[in-house]
Amino acid sequence: MKQTDINILMKEDVWSLIGKEWMLITAGNIDSFNTMTASWGGIGWLWNKPVAFLFIRPERYTHGFVENNDDLTLSFLPEQYREALKVCGTLSGRDCNKVEKAGLTPLKLNSPSHISFDESRLCLVCRKLFKVPMTEDSFIDKEVLARWYNSNPGGSLHDIYVVEILEAWNKE
Ligand SMILES: Cc1cc2nc3c(=O)[nH]c(=O)nc-3n(C[C@H](O)[C@H](O)[C@H](O)COP(=O)(O)O)c2cc1C
């Protein structure tokens, strides 16, 4: 992959990029990292910076890596890797080497803590700016709380992260 201008995002359908294409959130370094699939989030503009909004449940193994590192990457893979994304979205790195099971090849970008995959078509290198845990009383529409949290005792409220998009990498 090669570094490119982050304005490459102007050519992306950011509506579909996270919600439909899905992404891998990866944090750590080449010797110790974890990745997970995410389809909730957004890309936008905040504090005069290009940002992404991520929603990560604290019980995810990836959460610890995100907490312990300043930076993380968001990797987007072509449709042919949908199964790999399903593997990374159902298995936990706590229990197995899911990257290997998914058939993905880790790729170090220009820093030891910027990890993507050979299979990515686009990778955004990001730096954490802000984190806030969701609280029950923050939900204005309690039906959302009931639908996604209270009726799912195994799933805790997400932590919300705002990350600055520092770099974009692609294959062209
Ligand atoms: C399509 C899809 C989207 C997902 N989106 C999110 C998300 O936005 N936030 C989240 O916390 N978990 C999300 N998950 C669940 C995690 O990817 C899943 O729990 C994963 O196994 C966590 O791996 P880890 O324990 O190695 O971090 C998603 C799973 C799938 C299949």
Image: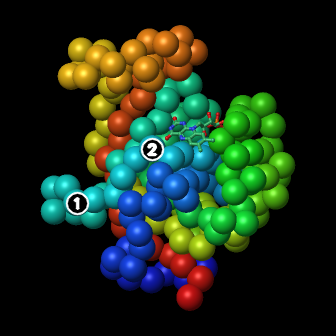
Q: Is residue 120 left or right of residue 124?
A: right
Mark 2 packing: few (<14 Cα in 10 Å), some, or many (20+)? some
Residue 140 rendering spot, x and y as whole percentages: 21, 22
Residue underneath mark 2: 40
Snapshot quadrant of residue 11 = bottom left
Respond yes or no on whether mark 2 lies under 8 Å from ligand 1.
Answer: yes
On screen, residue 110 above or below 87: below
The label on residue 163 is none
Instruction: Please report the residue visible at 28 percent of the width from the left and 42 percent of the height from the top.
Output: 130
Residue 107 rendering spot, x and y as whole percentages: 67, 67
Amino acid type at image mark 1: Trp
Instruction: Please report the residue visible at 41 percent of the width from the left and 69 percent of the height from the top.
Output: 13
Residue underneath mark 1: 45
Q: How many marks?
A: 2
Snapshot quadrant of residue 22 = bottom right
Residue 54 rendering spot, x and y as whole percentages: 40, 44
Front in this rendered view, residue 75 or 73: 75
Question: Which of the four quarters of the rendered structure image does ligand 1 lie in?
Answer: top right
Mark 1 packing: few (<14 Cα in 10 Å), some, or many (20+)? few
Respond yes or no on whether mark 1 lies under 8 Å from ligand 1.
Answer: no
On screen, residue 73 above or below 122: above
Amino acid type at image mark 2: Trp
Residue 41 rendering spot, x and y as whole percentages: 40, 47
Distance CA(mark 2)–CA(mark 1): 17 Å
Element assignment for label 2: loop
On screen, residue 65 above or below 15: above
Say if residue 108 shows up in the picture. Answer: no
Q: Is residue 88 left or right of residue 109?
A: right
Sequence-wise first label, 2 or 1: 2
Q: Is residue 58 left or right of residue 1?
A: left
